[in-house]
Structure formats: C-alpha cells, structure tokens
Amino acid sequence: MQYSDILKKLKSLSNPKAIEGMAKHGITLESAYGVSIPNLRKS
C-alpha cells in the first residue's frame, strides 16, 4: 500500500464530529482526521 493510498483511506474514515472534539483538547486540526481507534483496527 502506498502512502497516498493510506491517506485516502484515513480521509474516508474521517469523522467531523471527532475533529471538533479534538479541537477542544488543543489538537491541531490541519493534520487531524478524526478516526477512532476501533475504526483503524477494523481497516
């Protein structure tokens, strides 16, 4: 799997509500995808 394929997969699993929650904890949003660990483990 290529780097670009991995990024496409992460973007497809992205959750906008999770990203909003991450902002509350000071996580920078430019590089956040908001993918939960259970979703990563399924993939």
Image (cartoon, rainbow, N blue to C red):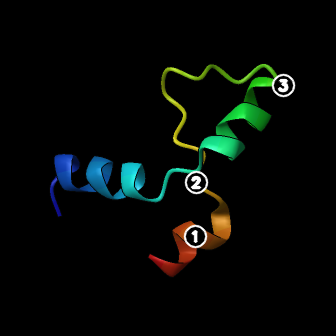
Q: Is residue 23 left or right of residue 43?
A: right
What amino acid type is highlighted by mark number 2?
A: Val
Q: Position of residue 6 (x, y in %)?
A: 29, 55
| Mark 1–mark 3 CB contact (< 8 Å) | no
- Residue at screen point 54% across, 33% down: 32
Q: Which residue is mark 2?
A: 35
Q: CA distance from mark 2 to mark 3?
A: 16 Å
Q: Dot 2: what SS?
A: loop
Mark toward the start of the polypeptide (1 vs 3): 3
Q: Position of residue 12 (x, y in %)?
A: 38, 56
Q: Which mark is residue 20?
A: none
Between residues 2 and 42, which one lies in front from this camera angle?
42
- Residue at screen point 72% across, 32% down: 20
Q: Dot 1: what SS?
A: helix
| Mark 2–mark 1 CB contact (< 8 Å) | yes
Q: Dot 3: what SS?
A: loop
- The image quarter containing residue 35 is bottom right
Residue sitting at the far right: 25
Mark toward the start of the polypeptide (2 vs 3): 3
Q: Is residue 1 left or right of residue 41?
A: left
What amino acid type is highlighted by mark number 3?
A: Lys
Q: Position of residue 39 (x, y in %)?
A: 58, 70
Q: Which mark is residue 39?
A: 1
| Quadrant including the N terminus | bottom left
Around disc 1, counting alpha carbons within 10 Å, would you say few (fewer than 14), some (14 to 19), or many (20 or more)? few
Around disc 3, counting alpha carbons within 10 Å, would you say few (fewer than 14), some (14 to 19), or many (20 or more)? few
Between residues 16 and 37, which one lies in front from this camera angle?
16
Q: CA distance from mark 2 to mark 1?
A: 7 Å
Q: Which residue is mark 3?
A: 24
